[in-house]
Amino acid sequence: MIPLDFPIIQRALIGSILAGLLTGLVGVFIIRMKLTSSSFCLSHAAFAGAALGITLSLNPLSMALIFSAIIASIIGPVADKAKLHADIIMSITFPLNMALAFIFITLAPSVSQLTGEFTTILWGSVLSMDINDIAILAIILLVTTIVFYLLWKEFFSIMFNKMMAEADGINTKFFVYLAIFIIGIVVTLSLKLVGGLLVFALLVNPASTAFQFLHELKKIVILSPLIGAATCAAGLILSLFLNWPVGACIVMISTLCFAISVFLSPKRKRG
């Protein structure tokens, strides 16, 4: 039996569901806009920020958010300047973030200080979620949903055909920049759930699963967050039963769901 009457478990479950909804929603835009590199690039930017925070004796998660937001803000302009796709720039930035993280770790005042703080960033610590974490996740989920709803026409046009969207007068650069920035915020806020090493699976797997069953993008945008929430909740419950790491359980279940969806997909049968 899972002690759902314990406040710590209730907070973890609510936080998992909110994070699953948020990453599932953003994941649709990541896949359709071909920004898959953003998940691991920005998660490692958060690593570097957290390591810098520990080195400077500042709040690691706050520094992770700031560092990730800065990297997310410069990726688009650099890609345009270099005349390369943003995915390529993110692939280049990824090892740079890792290098910076290792340098900051080396400069940290003590190893003991790294143990607790940095482990949370690496592997997640959903059971340490408090009311403030849940409130922040809920606010970001609400804001992200509103932004995508209000700007759905523009985002849909870009995801359908970027060149046609530009021909219609849509400022595609702005919306790509905005999407990358939102991804950076979502990645950082999801670190407590699965950790930076696994967060990209949470951003890609639910949306990929939804794409196996549906063609209409509006329906996919609804289904993907639901899959994300379900896999996060199921992963948390499995981890409590087996005493396994929460992040690892969530990733295993979301990957299993994707594997099953490939075999059951109407698209596969039609092919």
Image (spheres, rainbow, N blue to C red):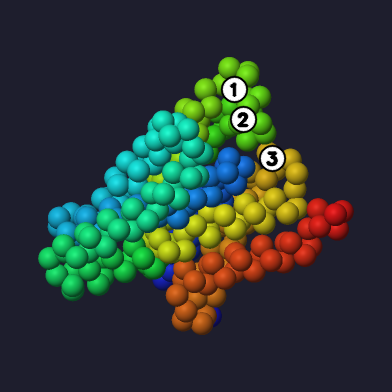
Classify residue 74 by image quadrant: top left
Front: mark 3 or 2: 2
Q: Residue at x 28, y 65 (%)?
A: 118
| Local SS, label 2 | helix
User: Which amino acid type is shown beneath numbered disc 2?
Assistant: Lys
Q: CA distance from mark 1 to mark 2?
A: 6 Å
Classify residue 212 by image quadrant: bottom right
> Disc 3 vs disc 2: Cβ atoms closer than 8 Å?
no
Q: Residue furthest top?
A: 169
**Residue 94 percent coordinates (x, y):** 40, 53
On the image, numbered disc 2 is attached to which residue?
162
On the image, numbered disc 1 is attached to which residue?
166
**In the figure, is residue 20 to the left or right of 103?**
right
User: Which amino acid type is shown beneath numbered disc 3?
Assistant: Leu
Residue 177 vertical position relative to residue 4 in the rendered view, above or below = above
Determine which of the numbered discs, if any, sits on residue 146 in the image. none
Along the line of sight, which residue is nearer the eye, 107 or 133?
Answer: 107
On the image, numbered disc 3 is attached to which residue?
217
The local crowd at label 2, few if under 14, some if 14 to 19, many if 20 or more residues have their Cα within 10 Å, is: some
> Disc 3 vs disc 1: Cβ atoms closer than 8 Å?
no
Q: CA distance from mark 3 to mark 2?
A: 15 Å
The local crowd at label 3, few if under 14, some if 14 to 19, many if 20 or more residues have their Cα within 10 Å, is: some
> Disc 1 vs disc 2: Cβ atoms closer than 8 Å?
yes
**Residue 48 percent coordinates (x, y):** 29, 55
**Residue 54 percent coordinates (x, y):** 20, 60
Mark before the other along the chain sequence, 3 or 1: 1
